């Protein structure tokens, strides 16, 4: 089955599900009794399970989807089966931009996305998109799990999106089909797919590359057909997407750290009781540690695995990259706020 057919089929499933929910004939599979003359239909029995759609773009084996499965099990257990998550990985319900829109409109309840495409919805996440803003994972966690992370989520007020926790995509590395990359000059003229984010595109322009924004679901084919020379992503995405089949070179630059906020639809959130909100929030925080642990476990073994798959790996000294991309900070300082940037830098090691 082609990806497109799968996408269409999944959309159909969602539509049918929505219809079934609206007409009230789902659940135990029996058709709802036809309402008698003038009678209002009885509300669904309270033991009916509410199914939440949790959609993501990477392969099903990636910790975005695996994290949602763990989270779903927690919710199901803690609400005595009232809520369950049905996952839709692999861009089945659309690109990250479309998933964020779906969460906003309430056609999708949950998503996990990179912060980069959120730039089209809110300026709140922009600071996390700056190159080399986080020195390492503990630095990122101190910022995102603390007051700054909370204030980022607070700024979503009124957008129809609620942020529950910062899960993780990870430190991004560059792959390409043309040549080994060590210094920024090696990027000259390379056509690199980036996410739809101006800071990311500006950063790649600074090293002389030609950034080409594209939805993740189109990336494998674009790499295969040579529409772009390369792309950048954390090791777990590179691995589960089988990019080693179409990319010979991997440079461990770690130029951006991509947090992956777990987002829930505001329209759905408003239907929850205070007690349920507490359960959803607490479970999201507990699942964060598990989800980040999955990424770490993959990061620890994937350099060797990708090398065994035939990728040629380089380990660039990051100092010249930091220097080359530094002008992006001045470009974006007014939009993001110099104080916030400084505050985050001071929380480094
Ligand atoms: O958020 O689009 C991307 O490259 C992202 O890293 C990926 O879809 C997961």
Image (cartoon, rainbow, N blue to C red):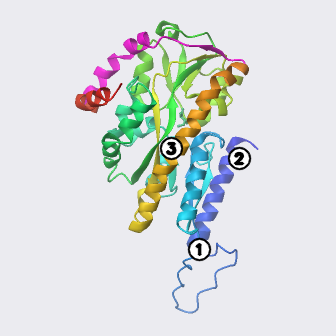
Marks 3/2: CA distance? 35 Å
Contact check, label 3 and label 2, Cβ < 8 Å: no
Asked if residue 304 lies left or right of residue 135, the reply is right
Residue under the image location 34 percent in, 32 percent down: 127
- Mark 2 residue element: helix
Instruction: Please identify the dominant SS of the magenta region.
Output: helix
Asked if residue 277 lies left or right of residue 154, the reply is right
- Mark 1 residue element: loop
Contact check, label 1 and label 3, Cβ < 8 Å: no
Mark 2 CB near ligand 1 (8 Å cut) = no
Single out the residue that lies furthest toward the front.
349
Residue 321 point in image, percent of width and height: 43, 13
Between residues 288 and 197, which one lies in front from this camera angle? 288
Magenta stretch, residue numbers: 310-334
Position of residue 132 relative to residue 115, above or below, is: above
**Residue with the mark numbered 1:** 48
**Residue with the mark numbered 2:** 5
How many numbered dots are placed on residues in this image? 3
Residue 319 falls within the magenta-colored stretch: yes
Residue 57 in view: no
What is the number of the mark on residue 289?
Answer: 3
Label 3 CA crowd tier, 10 Å (few <14, some 14–19, many 20+): some
Ligand 1's quadrant is top right
N-term mark: 2 or 1 = 2
Mark 1 CB near ligand 1 (8 Å cut) = no
Residue 13 point in image, percent of width and height: 66, 58
């Amino acid at each position: 089955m082609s990806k497109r057919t799968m996408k269409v089929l999944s959309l159909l499933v969602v539509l049918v599900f929505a219809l079934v929910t609206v007409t009230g004939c789902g659940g135990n599979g029996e058709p709802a009794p036809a309402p008698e003359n003038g009678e209002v239909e009885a509300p669904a029995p309270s033991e009916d399970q509410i199914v939440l759609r949790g959609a993501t773009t990477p392969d099903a084996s990636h910790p975005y989807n695996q994290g949602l499965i763990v989270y779903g099990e927690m919710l199901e257990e803690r609400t005595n089966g009232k809520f369950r998550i049905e996952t839709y990985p692999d861009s089945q319900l659309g690109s990250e931009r479309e998933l964020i829109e779906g969460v906003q409109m309430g056609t999708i309840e949950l998503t996990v996305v990179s912060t980069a495409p959120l730039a089209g919805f809110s300026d709140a996440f922009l600071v996390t998109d700056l190159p080399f803003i986080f020195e390492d994972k503990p630095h990122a966690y101190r910022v995102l799990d603390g007051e700054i992370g909370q204030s980022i989520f607070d700024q979503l007020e009124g957008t129809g999106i609620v942020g529950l926790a910062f899960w993780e995509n990870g430190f991004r590395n560059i792959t390409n089909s043309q040549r080994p990359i060590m210094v920024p000059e090696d990027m000259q003229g390379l056509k690199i797919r980036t996410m739809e984010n101006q800071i990311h595109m500006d950063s790649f322009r600074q090293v002389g590359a030609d950034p080409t924004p594209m939805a993740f679901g189109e990336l494998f084919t674009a790499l295969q057909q040579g529409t772009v020379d390369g792309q950048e992503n954390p090791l777990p995405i590179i691995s589960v997407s089988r990019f080693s089949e179409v990319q010979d070179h991997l440079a461990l630059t770690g130029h951006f750290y991509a947090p992956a906020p777990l987002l829930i639809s505001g329209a759905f959130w408003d239907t929850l009781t205070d007690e349920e909100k507490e359960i959803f929030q607490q479970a999201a925080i507990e699942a964060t540690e598990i989800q980040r642990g999955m990424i770490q476990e993959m990061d620890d073994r994937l350099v060797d695995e990708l090398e065994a798959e035939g990728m040629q790996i380089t380990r660039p000294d990051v100092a010249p990259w930091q220097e080359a991309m530094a002008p992006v900070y001045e470009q974006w300082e007014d939009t993001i706020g110099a104080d916030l940037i400084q505050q985050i830098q001071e929380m480094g090691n």
